[in-house]
Image (cartoon, rainbow, N blue to C red):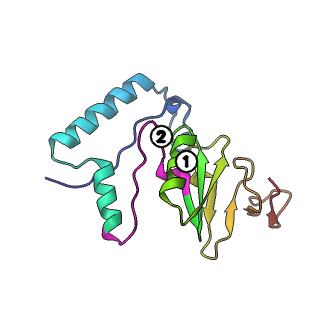
Amino acid sequence: MSGIALVRKPGPRISEGIVTHLQREPVDPGRALDQHQAYVAALEAAGWRPEVESVARAVRDLGLKTVMIARPGTLDGGDVLQSGPTVYVGRSARTDDEGIRQLAALLPERRVVPVNLRGVLHLKSAVTALPDGTLIGDPRHVDLPGLLVPPEEPGATSSRWAASAC
């Protein structure tokens, strides 16, 4: 069998994950990493292709441009958000300044904007781009001027939209 498998190594804070629909049980991060490595080995033994190569091929097949970040730089796709000619890149545990610098050099036709993150896995956990290019998200987690903030949840004190001045 040959196919594409997208996997992600468990993060160092896996034991802090929030579970709302199941009885909470302690998570052993070391055991989770061992299980992950065994899972990846089983996929490879079954003929599944590496993630980077297969995803790059799928993206190219869509007619899109792909670029590679060289070590020691790191860049996670969840930290990259394009809106028009601008590419926003979150600084996270998976994306560093060297990765952002390389991306900017590889995309000279785009404006690459680094974004500081707080308390989220990656940029797309806190921000998204609407079809018209408007950025919508949570200013508690990103430093992004002009961010459109959605209304509060039902029962909260405020229900109007506002632009953040982060």
Above or below, comparing residue 77 to residue 25 in the picture: below
Look at 16% across and 40% down and name the residue there.
45
Of marks 1 and 2, which one's residue comes earlier in the chain?
A: 2
User: Image quadrant of residue 64?
Assistant: bottom left
Q: How many marks?
A: 2
Query: What's the amino acid at mark 2?
Result: Gly
Secondary structure found at label 2: loop
Look at 57% across and 41% down and name the residue there.
97
Above or below, comparing residue 143 to residue 145 in the picture: above
Q: Position of residue 154 (x, y in %)?
A: 76, 61
Look at 54% across and 66% down and name the residue there.
109
Residue at which label 1 appears: 101
Look at 47% across and 52% down and name the residue there.
77
Magenta-colored span: 61-80
Residue 104 versus residue 159: which sits nearer the camera?
A: 104
Q: Which mark is residue 73?
A: 2
**Residue 75 vs residue 37: left or right?**
right
Query: What's the amino acid at mark 1?
Result: Arg
Secondary structure found at label 1: helix
